[in-house]
Amino acid sequence: MTDDEHAISYQALRRGTPVLDVHGIEVGTVKKVHHIQREHMLDGIDIDTPDGPRFVDAPEVSRITNRAVTLTIDQTDVAALPQPRNVMADRVKMSTTVRRARRFGDALRDRWDRR
């Protein structure tokens, strides 16, 4: 920790901030911060890594400073983390219009196959 480094809130965390593992090795950069709005709590962080995007759950975040995010896990554990969920894609997949269109397409395919 340097003299001009200080702890900040997850709400002030900026995209592109370096993410360090427990040993201080840079494993990626911050892509997006997820929070539980009703409870004003950190839910997790999406990070860009050389292995692709990963989702770091809140308990694995040790410290957030103005210079970096430090995790409680090491580099090999970061590579094993899950990819972030696409919330908008999940919402679209479950929308009424999409479900109706899918059922209509299935019915049309069944009629085509029975002809």
Image (cartoon, grey):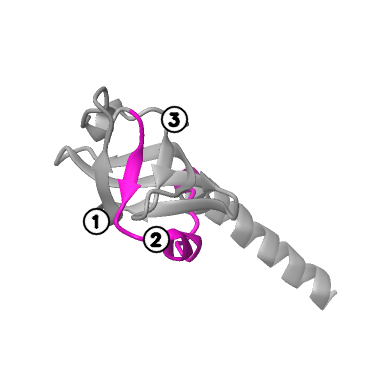
Amino acid type, callout 3: Arg
Q: Residue 55 appears at what percent x and percent y? A: 42, 53
The residue under label 1 is: 59
Amino acid type, callout 2: Asp
The residue under label 3 is: 15
Image quarter of the C terminus: bottom right
Measure the C-alpha gap from mark 2 to mark 3: 21 Å
2 or 3: mark nearer the eye: 2
Q: Are marks 3 and 1 in contact (CB under 8 Å)?
A: no
Please report the bounds of the magenta region as a residue range: 67-88
Q: Residues within 10 Å of mark 1 (few under 14, many from 20)?
A: few
Q: Is residue 79 magenta?
A: yes
2 or 1: mark nearer the eye: 2
Image quarter of the N terminus: top left
The residue under label 2 is: 74
Amino acid type, callout 1: Pro
Decide which of 9, 20 is in the foreground and name it.
20
